Image: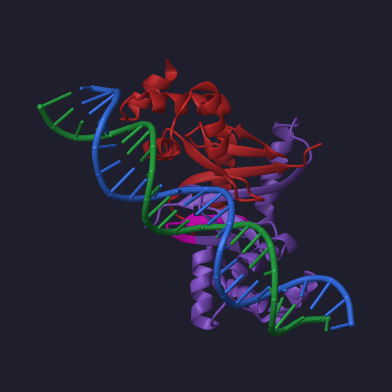
Chain colours: A purple, B red, C blue, D green
DNA sequence: GTGTCTGCAAAGAATTTGCAAAGAC
DNA sequence: GTCTTTGCAAATTCTTTGCAGACAC
């Protein structure tokens, strides 16, 4: 099972709660705490709020999850995709947009136009669209 | 005075508290609530926390301030620059990076590569660098 | 068996709200 | 004068913590 390996590989001990939270994130992809708790209550059963907080924190620290924030409201969502990627915001929907070519395009542009910006670690592009 | 005109033009009534908060943001450029309150206590005198919350909310709603979030921690900062622009993150420092050419570069790229992404409203690039 | 994780309940922070007085226009 | 904003204190909501028992390995 994917979840189990990923949690193990991140160096975390396997517990039912961690598996539940990770599975929730695999289904939800992007979610705020509230949605995760709702999902867990519906699909898993009782899990304490403080445990959810602790599990999510351990996942972020271990690099299993990342964070992404809405540019308009600043609301932050946990993101099942931890590797570098871009994001699309359309109304309430957040989508990952993996595009290494775009990363390289921006990187090349910045390096040539702004050589004073050194040691770039990460480029993230946030694209907001109007919901039709 | 710049602050006064901007607040007025945003359609908000002028109060000493609004002028104080706006002036604080002009000095601070990017700041979290905590830093704003600290600045106000040092430079202005007593102002209630709930008033600061309400003033900041009215400013964001009126388009006088925007929000920007750290990609790593998700911490959100109020930003004195409300018009579209990009951001540089270097250690604890956040800088605005205004570059319409970059916006157009990304926009052109997305439009040609991903014609399915319609009605793009905003492009924001977040650049994280390693602090030397 | 040892050390980490969870549940619980309580503490602590952060944010919002109701209301009366003060202030902007 | 009318309608909005502020200060204050209380209420909510959100997040963290301490500790004892349960659990992973």
Total count of labels: 0
Residue B78 lies left or right of residue B95; in this view the side is left
- Residue B46 image point, x, y percent: 46, 27
> Does residue A80 show up magenta in the picture?
no
Q: Is residue B106 above or below residue B13?
A: below
Q: Quadrant of the N terminus of chain B?
A: top left
In which quadrant of the rendered view does residue C7 lie? Answer: bottom right
Q: Is residue A109 visible?
A: yes
In which quadrant of the rendered view does residue B42 lie? Answer: top right
- Residue A73 image point, x, y percent: 46, 49
Residue A19 lies left or right of residue D8; in this view the side is right
Q: Is residue B25 above or below residue A47?
A: above
In which quadrant of the rendered view does residue A111 lie? Answer: top right
Q: Which residues are magenta?
A: A86-93
Farthest residue to the top: give it.
B1
- Residue A75 image point, x, y percent: 50, 53
Q: Residue at x 60, y 50 (%)?
A: B74
**Magenta span main SS:** strand
Q: Quadrant of the C terminus of chain B?
A: top right
Q: Is residue C8 above or below residue D16?
A: below
Q: Front-most of A62 and B113?
A: A62
- Residue B69 image point, x, y percent: 58, 45
Q: Front-most of A124 and B109?
A: A124
Q: Residue at x 53, y 21 (%)?
A: B43
Q: Is residue D24 above or below residue B97?
A: below
Residue B114 lies left or right of residue A56; in this view the side is left
Q: Is residue B115 visible?
A: no
């Amino acid at each position: 099972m994917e979840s189990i390996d990923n949690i193990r590989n991140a160096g975390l001990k396997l517990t039912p709660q961690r598996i539940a939270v990770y599975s929730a994130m695999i289904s939800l992809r992007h979610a705020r705490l509230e949605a995760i708790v709702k999902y867990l209550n519906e699909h898993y059963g009782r899990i304490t709020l403080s445990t959810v907080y602790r599990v999510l924190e351990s996942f972020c620290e271990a690099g299993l999850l990342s964070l992404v924030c809405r540019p308009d409201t600043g609301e932050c969502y946990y993101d099942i995709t931890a590797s570098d990627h871009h994001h699309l915001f359309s109304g309430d929907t957040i989508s990952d947009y993996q595009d290494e070519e775009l990363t390289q395009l921006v990187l090349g542009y910045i390096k040539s136009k702004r050589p004073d910006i050194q040691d770039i670690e990460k480029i993230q592009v946030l694209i907001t669209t109007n919901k039709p």
